[in-house]
Image (cartoon, rainbow, N blue to C red):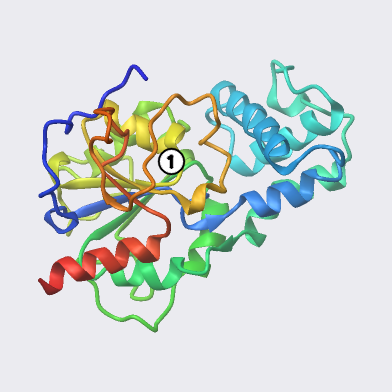
Amino acid sequence: MALQPSYASETPSLTLTEHRALIFDVYGTLIDWESTIHDALVHVFPDLPREEILVRYAGVEGKLQMQFQSTPYSKILELAYRQLAAGVEGELGKDSEQLGASASDDAALRFGRSIADWKPFPDTIDALHRLKKHFALVVLSNVDDHSFAQTHAKLCTPAHPGSAYPTITPDSPFALVLTAQQVGAYKPDPFMLASALRQLSANPDPSLPSNPGVHADASRVLVVANSLRHDILPAIQHGLRSVWISRYGVNVIGNERDLAVHYSDREGVTLVDDHGGKYPYTWRYETLGRMADAVEREVQK
């Protein structure tokens, strides 16, 4: 792997709680999107295993996001379904409206609206509201505003009052939400993460959302994500530390096998492996709940 973590010379004395802001990926990290995507596409590819279906989807989605960066994510989903159903995975049209017109309109439209059906992982809601008591939680997601609003509603709860920093609403765990639609790019475009860092600085872009109650230097920002391709590797480019929420290695999108990276079986801070190789992340936890447990252990010391 060409990219190398900037923190490779640091020691395991690093702590999670020395950071102020957590930049979260949402889909794959907080939300189980792959189950719904697979269930929708298994009818298109009835003879393929789960991993191959998701790899095919990820390839089409990534190409569409690169070509149509201003297209809302719900439309990207629709177009991806049309291409896959029509068997034109490598074909990119000149106009997003013209792609895959022969695919089933009803099925493609349902897939485009399916974000409303994507469910949080069992540990997500409790863990987010525990973490908000120690950090400013920032969303940086490849999604459109309308679709994220449906996800956001699932993650809000009055059951965990109080937070370390002002949140969007009293029931929300998030201090700031930035979407691909707002920024005008899709991850892994480095402009996405650069935009989030600027909105956390003392000089935010006035055209994007910001929170005057939250400012954090990049050295005190952690990227928390499941996708190595979309989030963890871009964090290295920006010199940021990161937490890989590995989800037991089940997730495929963003963690395809062609990524030549070292993995650790250990949880916690994992900078250098037993053979001197470097991991692309600073910490690894199987679930967000386990990360929240680790934070609370640090606080109790």
**SS for callout 1:** helix
**Residue identifier under label 1:** 182
User: How far across and down, in percent of the image, does residue 100 sit?
Assistant: 81, 27
User: How far across and down, in percent of the image, does residue 199 sit?
Assistant: 25, 43
The image shows residue 219, relative to residue 1, as above or below, that is below
Tell me what residue is drawn at x 12 percent, y 54 percent. Answer: 18
Tell me what residue is drawn at x 67 percent, y 28 percent. Answer: 60
Q: Residues within 10 Å of mark 1 (few under 14, many from 20)?
A: some
User: How far across and down, in percent of the image, does residue 101 sit?
Assistant: 85, 29
Tell me what residue is drawn at x 87 percent, y 34 percent. Answer: 103
Q: Amino acid at mark 1?
A: Gln
The image shows residue 159, relative to residue 15, as above or below, that is below
For residue 272, which quarter of the picture? top left
For residue 93, which quarter of the picture? top right
Horizontally, residue 280 falls left or right of residue 63, namely left
Quadrant (top left, top right, bottom left, bottom right) of the N terminus: top left
Horizontally, residue 189 falls left or right of residue 52, namely left
Q: Does the image show residue 187?
A: no
